[in-house]
Amino acid sequence: MTPMDTAVQLVPEGPEIPLVAPARRRRREWVSTAKTAWALRRSKIGVILFVVILGIAVFGPFVAPYSPTEFVGKTFEMPNSVARLGTDNLGRDVLTRVLYGGRTVFTLSLTATVVGMALGIVLGMFAAYSRRVVDEVVMRLLDVLMAFPMIVFVLLIVSAVGTKPYLIALAVAVASAPRIARVARGATLEIVGRDFILASEALGVPKWRIMLTELFPNITSPMFVEFGLRLAYSIGTIAALSFLGFGLQPPAADWGLMINENRIGIVIQPYAVAVPVLMIALLTIAVSLMADGLARAIIGIDRKTGVE
Amino acid sequence: MSEVVLTVKGLRVELESTGADIDDEVDFTIRSGEVLGLVGESASGKTTAATALLVHERRGAVVSRGEIVVSGKDVLGLSTAELRKVRGGLISYVPQDPSMSLNPALRIGTQLMEILEVHAFGASKEEREERVRQMMAEVLLPGDKTFLRRYPHQLSGGQQQRVAVAMAFACRPALIVLDEPTTGLDVTTQAHVLKTVRDLTHTYGVAALYVTHDLAVVANLADRIAVMYAGRLVEVGPRDTLFAGASHPYTRRLLASVPDLSGRHALRGIPGRAPLPGRRPVGCSFADRCDFTTDKCVEAFPPYEGPSDEHRVRCWRWQEVGAMSTAADFVPRSASATTRDGEAPVVTTRGVTAFYGPHEVLHGIDIDVRAGRCLALVGESGSGKTTLARCIAGIHPGTIAGGIRLRGHDLKRDSRRRPKPDRQAIQYIFQSPYGSLNPRCSIAQILSPPLRTFFRLSRAETERRMVEALEMVSLDESLLSVYPDQLSGGERQRVAIARALVAKPSVLICDEVTSSLDVSVQASIVELLVQLIDETGVAMLFVTHHLPLVRSLAQDVVVMNEGVIVEVGSVAAVLADPQAEYTRNLLADTPDVDRRGL
């Protein structure tokens, strides 16, 4: 027996109770993880909320009573029979603009998160697998980037490159990549020491191939959770950018932008601010709840099967 | 006859969620001054049964039936407060890994005093301190202040385990439960710990339960042996009776799979695997792997029967089995593996010196590995045996000096810099099949990289070669689509061997490939390796710390200690008449099953 064998056989946990029903297949494992997650109340609430808000964003424009740039009344009118949620600072229908304003939030935050994840995972895996000097250099450089508060960093990029939507998404992606890289590196470090990596190296399999086929499939669980968390952050950041005027430019309908435009009239017509705020808040909560539920399900499964 | 300290009757431990039995119908007694060896393979429920004696149920498990009486006290009925007094006082426990069980933040003196204080042992502090010194003397450790002021990490593994033993004996318990306390230790240290346990049990008249998977260990320690299989005791009896002729087929097969130093017989594994909790049959759980199975065996689990109260067996045909000669369990060693000779070495190392950072861990090693033969590399942990194997395989991360040659040409240090034929020629099999197979890849995905790397093959040809390799390791081709976590440890190691075989290597390096497996599985893996050498004529370097294994597999042996070779020679010569003092000590400390009855 080796130290490694004895290490897993901690007495209080005990090595003797074997798995009664081992996961038969990887695909089934994902199904069972999803089921475990779904069994938690938090993930149910999260998924339902998310689906509702996604539905508003996707189908909203089709059911909106007016055009988002159409003037339907005087400025800052309280809700009435013409404008169900009142009018905004220019007399446009708040309900219509809320229904239109979700798409950009979703597309931008999703793009930002996906790009950020890709960047972060590549950097993190590369650092962890390179070990030693390269690892140190990459991670310290990322530390420098992380020293900037995220929003300041994004503002810096946006003010330098401009406020086109894809540039905003890219800026948020670049800003979140270091944090993702740190998590990816942590997850990868656990795997790089395993013998199957060494086995592939002894065969002379190229390093990029080992990263892709041996390392990456083993860090997908933590990365999924990270994706959820980062998505929640991205939504907040992109809304904040719009609010600060660095995001989408008027007359575009966007929840973050709406908050900024209508905040001067908050005492006269609170709905024009409160509804987009509520939408963003609920969306962030929904994504966080889903990520948390998934994380709990994954940890639960890892506990049962032992870390594999 | 001395008094009975522990009585266990009809103990059943089950999983709370499913009601699956981890242990069932466990009955045994231990008298004072007696050591009962509880032997079983992994997942047989032995640790669960042992910790149940301390009324410790691991998470998810629950004692659902049975009775445990220690010195007239029914421990299962005790309250938590009473239990706290009993544990460590009346019943004590020595865990498997002392480095995990000793508190790393407390000095060992403090920890020893603590257990005495908790159980109000002795009237005064002076008396307790005296007891600590006495205990340290008994476990052959210095009892002075400076030693007691050390932290656990400042002690060696053997010293830590002796501290744990001292703690267990400190309050003069009636019963002591030892859970594989020597598993992580070298043979030399193991011998010391075993001697300490034996002496203390006899001196104090303690009843001891020694849980282990290693029959050789209990052969030297236990007075009686209880054999556990799939959660049930299948045979309980005096040690000598069991070794001379057990009455349960499983006990016999288990004994036959223990490698012995005399090496008169070949190792023989037990095919199949033990049924897991929740999937255990109504009938005898060994029926599907047994040579004696009848219809009756499948219908009902046999009751405890046997020649005497002391020796009880759970087998319908125990009388027939018991009457058979033990010679029938063993196959004589075939001579074919030893006939090849005189071939030029495939791999040679000359003056190989290796470093880990600034530390030199190997000092000028010369070895020759020949085709069709197996060279065993033996040494305790830290001897540099794995480092040498990894240097040859090109996966040692540090600097290497000296020459490593394959068929006369020099090998590059790093496998990545070696040309394809060199990489293909040398294949390395890792110690633990739990770490060496990617859990996210199916068996086909695990077997295909070597084929893709070394040969340009069509898809059908790749498939054919993979199936062929699985056949060579006696696995079914249907396993290609499954994942490692669906396989047992032995099956996983076979897959790892198959991965090495698909490359069609001329040198196979096996690094402790059986040390994480059960003895019966180890035996079948060794059978397989012997057969592979015979059939393919591959040159094998077998790294191990376990001397008896060497006899069953290798023709030549190199004994290493602290990075130097202390002895080289043929296995027969070295084991019969070791020249180096180190080898002699190693041999003397290696526990062996006494098979004089054969």
Image (tube, coloured by chain):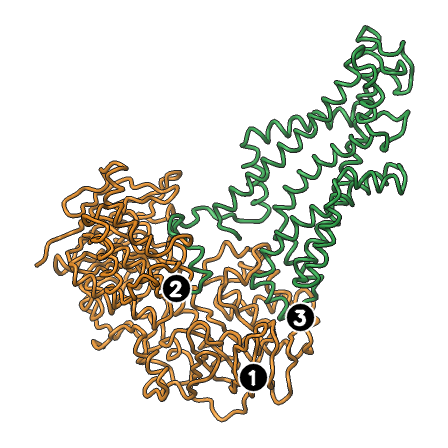
* Mark 2 residue crowding within 10 angstroms, few (<14) / some (14–19) / many (20+): some
Q: Position of residue A77 (x, y in %)?
A: 84, 9
Chain letter of the residue beneath label 3 in the structure image: A
**Up/down of B496 relative to A8, above or below:** below
Instruction: Give the mark toward the camera: 3 or 1.
Output: 1
Mark 1, secondary structure of its residue? strand
Q: Which residue is mark 3?
A: A204
Q: Position of residue B477 (x, y in %)?
A: 54, 62
* Mark 3 residue crowding within 10 angstroms, few (<14) / some (14–19) / many (20+): many
User: As drawn, is B28 to the left or to the right of B101?
Assistant: left
Dot 1 or dot 2, earlier in sequence = 2
Q: Which residue is mark 2?
A: B155
Q: Position of residue A69 (x, y in %)?
A: 91, 20
Which image quarter: residue A162?
top right
Q: Position of residue B19 (x, y in %)?
A: 35, 40
- Quick check: can you spot residue B321? no
State whether discs 3 and 1 lie on one chain. no
Q: Which residue is mark 1?
A: B352
Chain letter of the residue beneath label 1 in the structure image: B
Instruction: Give the mark toward the camera: 3 or 2.
Output: 2
Instruction: Give the mark toward the camera: 1 or 2.
Output: 2
**Up/down of B542 relative to A289, above or below:** below
Mark 3, secondary structure of its residue? loop
Disc 1 marks which amino acid? Val
Q: Colour of chain B?
A: orange
* Mark 1 residue crowding within 10 angstroms, few (<14) / some (14–19) / many (20+): many
Disc 2 marks which amino acid? Leu
**Colour green maps to chain:** A
Mark 2, secondary structure of its residue? loop
User: Which quadrant: the N terminus of chain A?
Assistant: bottom left
The structure residue drawn at horizontal position 64% and vertical position 88%, both measured from the top left corner, is B409
